[in-house]
Amino acid sequence: MTHPPLFSPITLRGLTLPNRVVVAPMCQYSAVEGCARDWHLQHYGALAASGPGLIVIEATGVAPEGRISPGCLGLYDDASEAAFTRLVAALKGFGNSRIAVQLGHAGRKAASAQPWHGNGPAETGRWETVAPSPLPFDAGWPAPRELTGTDLDRLVQAFADSAGRAVRAGFDTIEIHSAHGYLLHQFLSPLSNHRTDGYGGSLEHRMAFPLAVIRAVRAVWPADRPLGIRISATDWLDGGFTADEAVTYARAFKAEGIDYVCVSSGGVVPSAPIPVGPGYQVFLAERIRRETGLTVRAVGLIADPHQANTVIAEGEADLVAIGRGFLDNPRWVWHAALALGTEIAYPPQYVRAAPRSWPGAALAHPTAPPR
Ligand SMILES: Cc1cc2nc3c(=O)[nH]c(=O)nc-3n(C[C@H](O)[C@H](O)[C@H](O)COP(=O)(O)O)c2cc1C
């Protein structure tokens, strides 16, 4: 059977993803001391059972103070590594999805509250935050401490150490978090980086720390495993990081051994005039793909299977990430296959839900072919 483009495999270095559907990284704010718990097993387990090509595990701090919230995952000590080792092994036993971890540092946006406790800084369990410049994220947020050169060397090492732990935990790929106003993006954007040393000012200087991180991670990450990155390709504001700069950054990180980029946008300041709508970031992905030749993933209000398939079919991106669509419907992949008229393997425990063996499918899904 010839699969529609969304369901065709893709190979990155030594890793083949069985299809182009990716679960976008989504914080669950449910870790304890950085460690994955039962919630993560049930959440990611249900997603793995429906067979996306890649599941990207949520933003994970390379240091305790780099976590977005006190409930965020980390990969910085033996306990957090052991918890991930167990989780990754379990997920691989549930299907064919490949498993990524999004490694990052939240910088001035660290120590924030779990969203169900409000969107500001955490009231309990806070820690001192750090950033390129001592500029608070928003009114009511504390000013971060400005990072010194020694701090930056330590942080590069923290990324490398965390990547070493990711190798041992069995991850198929790492996705470096360089988007959404977290530390790497804070260096890239003139809105959050006012430094006058070799890490601020010109684009070359603003890219220096992110590129040092990428280089250090690539050095410990096995040559046969792909390395990815997520970027915000524009701040959507005058004086911010621009799409032109994103293209230059992408060329630079491609040269450092990045294999794919997920193209998102915004997040470095609390509000920007973002024209949110279906597929509103796809044009940014398409541009980076066309101008750099990188493997590119599109994301952002892509929820309809036909829409996702068209993004791939028209060459706008090579992969599509879906976030809230998967929270709404962990079986998104099954239903997308149905809608696009193709068949995929179900886990043996669930085979009787496949339309072929379940007359109820036509009732449950109006697009299901009659049995
Ligand atoms: C609950 C939730 C948590 C998120 N956490 C992360 C994260 O950890 N890292 C990240 O890069 N983006 C995060 N995002 C953004 C998503 O990955 C995605 O880019 C965004 O939701 C847009 O895609 P969608 O319209 O398909 O949901 C999060 C989004 C949601 C809804």
Image (tube, rainbow, N blue to C red):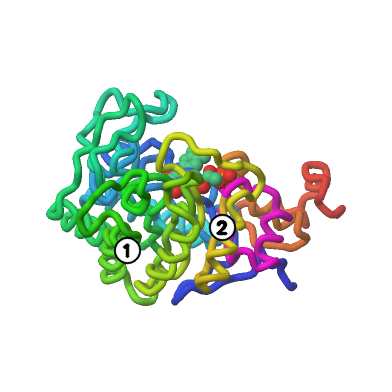
Measured as percent of width and height from the top left, residue 324 is found at 57, 42
Q: Which quadrant holds the N terminus?
A: bottom right
Measured as percent of width and height from the top left, residue 24 is found at 51, 50
Measured as percent of width and height from the top left, residue 46 is found at 54, 46
The structure residue drawn at horizontal position 38% and vertical position 36%, both measured from the top left corner, is: 30
Q: Is residue 45 visible?
A: no
Eye-nearest disc, 2 or 1: 1
Q: Which residue lies most toward the left here? A: 150
Residue 284, disc: 2
Indicate left or right for 56 with 194 as reference: right
Which residue type does callout 2 highlight? Leu
Secondary structure at badge 2 equals helix
The structure residue drawn at horizontal position 42% and vertical position 48%, both measured from the top left corner, is: 240
Q: Looking at the picture, tell me which residue is in the foreground, 91 or 187.
A: 187
Q: Which quadrant holds the C terminus?
A: bottom right
Task: Give the magenta-colored segment's residue range.
Answer: 300-322
Q: Looking at the picture, tell me which residue is in the foreground, 69 or 128.
A: 128
Residue 204, disc: 1
Secondary structure at badge 1 equals helix
* Residue 187, magenta (yes or no): no
**Is the residue 4 above or below the residue 274 in the image?**
below
Which residue type does callout 1 highlight? Glu
